[in-house]
Image (tube, helix red, strand yellow):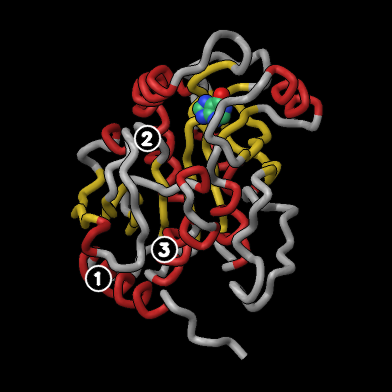
């Protein structure tokens, strides 16, 4: 009893545009968090398609988010990378923030690599560390599976961030990558955390905190995609005043290490 939903036709059209640009079906979708796009090297042979040319993708520019789909081949895999994501805190709906996942799936992707900038809750973490997301806490109060958004909303989340993919990443990581592994707490934002909220998040099992990713993971699992997630640790929560400028600058510095680790992992995703 699936109805044809508004937006489905735009996604199908955009998926066709993307497959044409890529020279075939996409294998892997990537959402690039703040600062990561400029770190993508020349080994990712790509065409940039502005979101304005893709009717399905909502977009509102933020510093560090460009608003284009990068389509091409990276280390032998056909990739669709989203440079620019929209967030709940900008006023977008769960459907908007997960459109990229739907589009990647429609273009053929069977896995998603989700990246973000995050604040550390684990006091052992240092700004500049990378965190492989082992699991998440969805504290946004939102969900992309509500209502009639999907046919089967009762999605198992036990292996949300695929153990298979995490093992591959760990194998490729060297000390120079500064890879940690932990639980990502996804909040609505946009303000940073109060000291009491930071203590609470740590108590309930969070290692890093941010304002994205969790809804994308939920929809990707619903669509039977494997998910790999990374946080770029841009600040340690509570250590000093947190500013957006500092978050952006640290993300830009760490981005080449994350791009390198993703590149090495791609052939086995
Ligand atoms: N809190 C929430 N989101 C963030 C942070 C933070 O400290 N740093 C980067 N994104």
| Closest to the observer, 251 or 26 | 251
Residue of label 2: 259
Circle 2 SS class: helix
Residue placed farthest to the right in the image? 203
Residue of label 3: 104
Question: Residue drawn 48% across and 31% down?
Answer: 117
Circle 3 SS class: helix
Q: Is residue 47 left or right of residue 252?
A: left
Q: Position of residue 209 (x, y in %)?
A: 61, 31
Residue of label 1: 17
Q: Position of residue 16 (x, y in %)?
A: 29, 75
Return the disc, 3 or 1, that comes first in the chain's sequence: 1
Q: Position of residue 91 (x, y in %)?
A: 48, 49
Query: Do the residues under discs 3 and 2 have CB atoms within 8 angstroms?
Result: no
Disc number lying in front (2 or 1): 1
On screen, residue 60 above or below 133: below
| Closest to the observer, 172 or 208 | 208
Q: Which mark is residue 181?
A: none
Query: Do the residues under discs 3 and 1 have CB atoms within 8 angstroms?
Result: no
Return the disc, 2 or 1, that comes first in the chain's sequence: 1
Question: Residue drawn 23% across and 68% down?
Answer: 23
Residue placed farthest to the top in the image? 240
Total numbered circles: 3
């Amino acid at each position: 009893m699936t109805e044809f939903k508004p937006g489905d036709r735009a996604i199908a059209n955009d998926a066709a545009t993307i497959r044409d640009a890529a020279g075939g079906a996409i294998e892997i979708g990537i959402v690039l968090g703040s600062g990561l796009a400029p770190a993508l090297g020349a080994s990712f042979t790509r065409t940039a398609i502005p979101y304005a040319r893709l009717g399905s993708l909502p977009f509102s520019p933020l510093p560090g988010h460009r608003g284009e789909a990068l389509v091409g081949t990276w280390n032998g895999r056909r990739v669709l990378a989203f440079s620019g994501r929209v967030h709940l805190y900008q006023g977008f709906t769960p459907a908007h923030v997960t459109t990229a996942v739907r589009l990647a799936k429609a273009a053929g992707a069977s896995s998603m690599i989700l990246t973000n900038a995050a604040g550390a809750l684990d006091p052992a973490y240092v700004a500049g560390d990378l965190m492989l997301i082992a699991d998440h806490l969805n504290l946004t109060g939102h969900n992309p599976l509500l209502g009639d958004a999907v046919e089967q909303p009762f999605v198992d989340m036990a292996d949300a961030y695929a153990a298979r993919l995490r093992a591959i990443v760990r194998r490729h990581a060297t000390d120079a990558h500064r890879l940690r592994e932990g639980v990502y707490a996804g909040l609505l934002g946009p303000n940073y955390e109060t000291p009491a909220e930071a203590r609470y998040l740590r108590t309930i099992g969070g290692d890093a905190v941010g304002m994205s990713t969790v809804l994308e993971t939920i929809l990707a699992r619903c669509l039977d995609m494997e998910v790999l997630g990374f946080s770029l640790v841009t600040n340690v929560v509570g250590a000093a005043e947190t500013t957006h400028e500092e978050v952006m600058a640290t993300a830009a510095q760490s981005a080449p290490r994350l791009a390198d680790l993703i590149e090495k992992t791609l052939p086995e995703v």
